[in-house]
Structures are given as structure tokens and as C-alpha cells.
Amino acid sequence: MVATSQPVINSFDKTLINVIVNHNETNLIFARSITVVGNTKTMTVLTIIAAALLLLIKRYPLALYFAGTMALANLTNSIVKHIIKRPRPTAHHLVHAGGYSFPSGHSIGSITFFSLLIIVTIILVKSHVLQTLATLIFGSMPILIGYSRIYLHVHFPSDVLGGFLLGLTFIMVSLYLYYRYRLSFNPTSTPFARDSLN
């Protein structure tokens, strides 16, 4: 629908832009600060750190799962951008942004990364309180980053939604593959079981 500029997409974008965009200085400062978390460089560094920590505690399949999912999601983002070739919004950009608009790289990167953190936390942490707290904190980050991309005029809302959908797709597919890998070694294993394959 984005590629063919369907009216429903244009209506969706205009409606959310009117709701989100304003000239509040505090919102601008916040958006510029939070959007940095979703930058490619930031996501790459955070992914390397997360994978390294998992390797350090000898969770080798989990480290591979984490890094592999992030790499595949970002590669797909680049491919889709060059297939769709959607220009960015013509409004004055409040931060630098180059390349094509759909899907939002910040959105696909952040939803994938923080969803992986939630999964890793559920696998490794026994406390339900900490699991819930981590889910709330990590789950809010992609939403805030996606909001910032719209607020800063560098993405349409449908770019952000598209990035979220792609990222969640990779999470579901990669979690299924990870589960199947575990089953090949332990038929009674579940995705969130704590055993030597973690």
C-alpha cells in the first residue's frame, strides 16, 4: 500500500502527524535525545555488547540468535528501502536523515533489539517482577523512538509502523528457528526453558 500510495496510507499518515507534531521545545529536546538510541551506530554497538555479554556467560546459541536476528533485520530494512524508494517527508527535518523513508530503520532496529532483550531477560532472569519491569521498560523504547522519528519530520507514521511490523516478524521467525534448534538437541525443551542450551 505504501509503494502504490494508497489513500488509506495517506490518510493514516496525515492523521497521526496532526496528532504528534507540535512546536513544544521540551518535546523537541526529548525527541532529539531519544532518537539517538535508534541510530544504526548505537544499535550496532549495543548489539555487540549484548552478544559479547552472552558469550561471556557461555550462552553461545543465544548470542548467535541475538546477533543473527539483528543483522538479518537490518539487512532486510536496507533491501526494502531500495525496493520501495519512498522519499522522506518534505517538511523541514529537525535532525539529519538521508536515504529512503520506508521502512524506518530506527523502528525496525529498535523493535528488534528491545524485543530480543525482553526474550533474553525472560530466559535468563527467574524473577517475575524483574521480567515484568524489563518488559515495560524495553517495550516502551521502540514506541518512543518511533514517535521521535515522526516528530522530527524524518519519517511518515506508516514508515514507523512498517518498521515495527518487519521487526516483529523477524522476532517471531527467529524465535521459532531458535526453538527448533533447541528441540533438535532436547525434545522436551521450550523457548524459555533454562538449560545448558541457553
Image: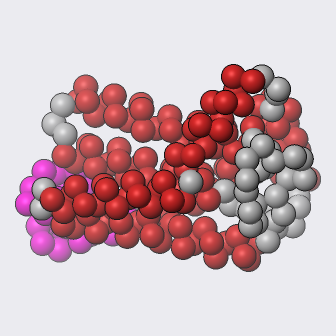
**Does 6 appear above or below 18?**
below
Q: Residue at x 86, y 32 (%)?
A: 18
Q: Nearer the viewer, residue 154 or 189?
A: 154
- Number of numbered discs overlaid on the protein picture: 0
The residue positioned 45% from the left and 70% from the top of the image is 71
Q: Decide: is 195 above or below 146.
A: below
Q: Is residue 175 something that shows in the picture? A: no
Q: How is the image coloured?
A: secondary structure
| Placement of the N terminus among the 4 image quadrants | bottom right
188 relative to 9 in the view: left or right: left
Please tell me which residue lies in front, 23 or 195: 23
Viewer-proximal residue among 71 and 194: 71
Indicate whether residue 169 is drawn in magenta: no
Answer whether residue 183 is magenta in the image. Answer: yes
Q: Which residues are magenta?
A: 174-198
Does 25 sit above or below residue 59?
above
**Residue 122 in the image: x percent, y percent?**
26, 43
Does 150 sit left or right of 90 as displayed?
Answer: left
Q: Report x, y in % for residue 195.
A: 9, 56
In the displayed structure image, the side of residue 49 where residue 22 appears, left or right: right
Location of residue 90 with respect to 20 vertically, above or below: below
Quarter of the rendering occupied by the C terminus: bottom left
Q: Please name the residue shown 43% across and 53% down the image.
A: 113
Report whether residue 56 is seen: yes
Residue at 82% from the left image edge and 26% from the top image edge? 23
Query: Residue 157 or 4: which is nearer the viewer?
Result: 157
- Determine which quarter of the picture holds residue 77: bottom right
Residue 174 at x, y percent in the picture: 39, 65
**Residue 75 at x, y = what percent?**
54, 73
